[in-house]
Image (cartoon, grey):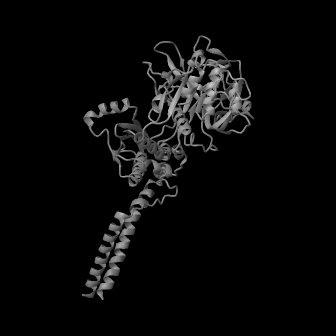
Amino acid sequence: MNATKNNFKNIAFTIGFIVILNIAGHFVFKRFDLTADKRYTLSQTSLNIVSEVKEPLYIDVFLEGDFPGEFKKLQTETQQLLEEFKSQNSNIIFQFVNPLEDEDNKDKTMQSFMERGMTPVNVTVNDKGQQTQEVVFPWAVATCGNRSVKVPLLKNMMGASTAQKVVSSVQHLEYAFSNAINTVSKAKQKKVAVIQGNGELHDVLMADFIKSVKDNYYIGPFTLDSVAKSPNNTLKYLKKYDLAIIAKPTEAFSDEEKQVLDQFVINGGKTIWLVDQVNMEMDSLYNDSGTNLAFPRDLNLNDMFFKYGVRIRPDLIFDLQNTPIALATGEQGSATQYTQYPWFYSPMIYPSQKTKNPIVSNLDGIKFQFASPIEVLKNDIKKTVLLESSKYSRLIGTPAEVSLKIVSERPDQKDFVGTGNYPVTVSLEGQFHSVFENRVLPFKDPTFKTKGKVSKMIVISDGDVIKNQLDKNMQPLELGYDKWTNNFYANKEFMLNCVNYLLDDNGLINIRSKEVDLPILDKEKVYASYTQSQVITVAVPIVILLIFGVVFTILRKRKYSK
């Protein structure tokens, strides 16, 4: 009888404790991140962005269905991160959707996704020699009110396995979703000017970049043609912008135009310079001889860059770490085939492990074309080399003949001893001095300053980094995609990072530096010891459970048999 009363008391106490704990949990909420890398602990920037969501924000994640193991991992990590967002603000509502659940409309659904730029991924699953094909849409869409933005969940990485892509993508998840939430929940504020008037790239050759920037900022063309007639008014209107992009100019800048751009910088305006210091284009090589002359291009910007703290040399970088080109081989007509060859004038630039800047953190290879080296000069401006050529690169002085025949040559590595690591992208930050300091001004400006606000700029020694290709219908392709080799480079992500870094006041770009140590199962080791793995993961737990059950039963019988 006493034992029954004691059991009843224990049960009542346990139930009461659980009830009290649940009531306390309703008023006091706390989540604990027990991971070593704190991957589920949101940064303060993310917390600030999430806290400002005042109306329902819906996130549809298209990672529902029968996936390979790697994508299951991506699905789990995405769900846990979104649960963390939701725990901070109940206005964030998410769901996982299988877009291909309706078999009858499967093709139509895939077509609609591709038209929106959300391309599927065909995944080959190897399971002990058996291969199956799966279609996965690694995308999400965030919607708030009438604003919507797509969120890429899987990063493109050339030559990487699916497991490696998933690890890199998980590191990118918090930034991707925080950026999307910030985009759809806040009105656009910053303005970006695409400078025109000096032979810069046509809009259609930057269409994908411009379209992507529009998600977060106002962006539009700004011509310098009016400088000749009304320089002060041109400068006045340019000052209303926060960032100016000068993409591959081919005509020299007048001193009046330089003064306008210079005073834009001095007054705190941010700039991205994409400058070809050597006149050379791939299209000019597609002739009967397959050759053309590369020679220095005078844009009348050398003194400006020198004053700011850099110098772009009129040389070409010849790099053994490069991107391929596809050239026609065989007879013309139906027998024509395209073969890929290494193109030494197109460096494949990987961010250095030494560079911790968020612009290039966790980035794949970036394609450059006829790039030039940047010299970093000494002055008071803080300079950071973001990208540089490989250690197996050297310089070709100009004028020089460039020929397609170089693809058949095999350079001697001895020629690269003591060379290499030439900067091709440099960020500058500080209080810039005007290039017209202690000089006669090209035009009178009552607001002229020789030194102004702290500002930033990024100098890239190749204008083609921002250039997208066109399809057969002359429609722009995604930036970074090479239709001739079917390779995908990280140019788009790099350029968007540059814009976000220069305009990001809330530190969102810094989330990119977060590192996640995601353990991935080594399938080769598992397959090599498949039976042993099954015994450890399946049989051993069952045996332990049986032993525990037997021991518990024996002890219970001994206790109550008395």
Outermost top residue: 288
Q: How many marks?
A: 0
Seen in the image, is 127 located left or right of residue 250?
left
Q: Is residue 392 visible?
A: no
Where does the image place residue 189, in percent across and percent down from the top left?
47, 36
Seen in the image, is 494 located left or right of residue 355?
left
Vertical relation: 560 (above or below) 115: below
Tell me the quarter of the picture where residue 339 sits. Answer: top right
Where does the image place residue 263, in percent across and percent down from the top left?
63, 29
* Residue ID at (57%, 43%): 358
Outermost front residue: 446
Where does the image place residue 256, in percent across and percent down from the top left?
64, 21
Closest to the observer, 45 or 344: 45
Image quarter where the N terminus lies is bottom left
Closest to the observer, 28 or 489: 28
Vertical relation: 298 (above or below) 33: above
Where does the image place residue 260, in percent across and percent down from the top left?
61, 25
Image quarter where the C terminus lies is bottom left
Q: Is residue 381 visible?
A: yes
Tell me the quarter of the picture where residue 475 sits. Answer: top left
Vertical relation: 61 (above or below) 219: below
